[in-house]
Amino acid sequence: MSRTVLLPALVGLVVLVGWQLLSATLPPFLMAGPLEVLSALSAHAGKLAHSAWITGSAAVAGLCIATLSGLLLGGLFATSRTAERALYPYALLVQTVPVIAIAPLLVVWLDYGWWVSCVSAAIVSFFPMLTGAHVGLRATDPDQLALLRLYGAGHRQQLLLLRLPAAAPHIFAGLRTAGGLAVIGAVVGDFVGSNGQPPSLGYVVLKAAAAADVARSFAAVVVSALLALALFGLTRVAEHATIGAWHGDRATA
Amino acid sequence: MAAPAVRFQAVDFRWSSDSPLLLSDFDLVVEAASVTAIVGPSGCGKSTLLRLAAGLVHPTSGTVNAGPAGAGHRGYVFQAPTLLPWRSVAENVGLPLDLVPGFVPRERTRRIADALRAVQLEDAADKLPHALSGGMQMRASLARALVTRPKLLLLDEPFSALDALTRRLVHQQFQAAWRAAAATVLFVTHDIDEAVLLADRVVSIGGSPLQIRADLPIPLPHPRTPELRHDPALGALVRTLEESL
């Protein structure tokens, strides 16, 4: 087995053993060890899977909204300096305002439930998508653009034949970051905007912690992390399938 | 005498209103079906002349007439291959046909095959550009310029990124391809040996604003082989041009 696999596995094992030993010295309402978390995962698998579906669907829907709006606004910025100058400060503002501060307002506007998590996920994942699309669409090689203009390509043909494919690596880089952030945004939305109907992951984390069921709270955190990993993995698969042949490791091999 | 393929007439050019004049009252005539090389020091404005001829930039005043614009009448080879990395070599070569209306799929396929054959890249048709050597990428770039069967071929230092051995090989392949295409070729280079070896006429330019320093016909027979480099006649022409710069 290569060192790239063995070393992280060894570190992980040491951390897990250390965590287990530490948890044995603390009361169960303060800390649960990996074995207790595993046991909670197994005992509440059905309910956690349902919660993962609620939070995961909000994260994915929020990511889709962020992707679409990020691409549209990034495209507008890349084609119009005036629009970029007028709107970019406000796009930056969306990035700088903490989502936890906006979430209570979302509850006011949208009522408790799934939509708060969805919009919260969209807000936090919007900026990486905008940046990816904006930078990518601006990074078109000027000579390639001149070539298309030489053959009379219009704006639409330039976009479809050159600018969009050339921007794809930047857009996927944005999507990788945005995927992880979308789960964070959805869980924050759950914390503030979920009343347990339906029981989202964030709600389970809070509810279990309040009931001193640390193992179950940890189990919900683990599921949230797995959700973010799954989104990251899906993005990588999509990236590999669409641009992997000409961009990245295979293309430079 | 054949009608001119490119005519610069009293051309003034500056990049922006506050930048200095790059060209002032500049005249140049390029005869049809000839190979003309423009030599000059780096950054003097050689590529700007090509971009003016291609219609990619427009003169501040005066006229540049290079035949009909668009519809594939002009082929252009950039200093870098500028292939689209997500398209196969064949699809890159066929790119101009996607933009020029009126090509049925069968004709498109035939044109691509002809262009690839002209630069001896038939076997690389399905490969992606990153799988090709630098020389092969430049040949694919030439095939793309040839695919619309242009009357005017504009080449912007197409050999400058190649190593010496590859450059000699690609010189031969380019000569064969553009002779077969019977196009007017206007190419810029900073390599005087290369200009004399490949062209029917070499125009040496320099100064600010740009001026023609020497305009020399190259009365050497075609095809020009690498061995011709050792010909005393070629050496004398090179020296004349070097003195003009």
Image (cartoon, helix red, strand yellow):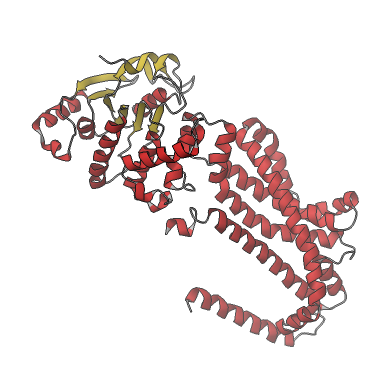
Q: Residue at x 60, y 49 (%)?
A: A171
Image height of A149 relative to B9, above or below: below
Answer above or below: position of A56 versus A63.
below
Corner quadrant of residue A197 = bottom right
Question: Between residues A173 and B209, which one lies in front from this camera angle?
Answer: A173
Q: Nearer the viewer, residue B115 or B34?
A: B115
Q: Quadrant of residue B138?
A: top left
Q: Position of residue B130 (x, y in %)?
A: 41, 51
Pick whichever, B18 or A130, lies toward us. Answer: A130
Q: Is residue A154 visible?
A: yes
Residue at image point 63% right, 79% down: A15
Q: Position of residue A81 (x, y in %)?
A: 62, 32
Q: Position of residue B84 (x, y in %)?
A: 47, 44
Q: Is residue B98 above or below residue B133?
A: above
User: What residue is rendered at 35% in x and 33% in y?
Assistant: B156
| Residue drawn at point x = 65 percent, y = 81 percent | A16
Vertical comparison of B87 with A185: above or below: above
Q: Position of residue A108 (x, y in %)?
A: 90, 51
What residue occupies the far front of the structure in this picture?
B106
Left or right of B172: which side holds A210? Answer: right
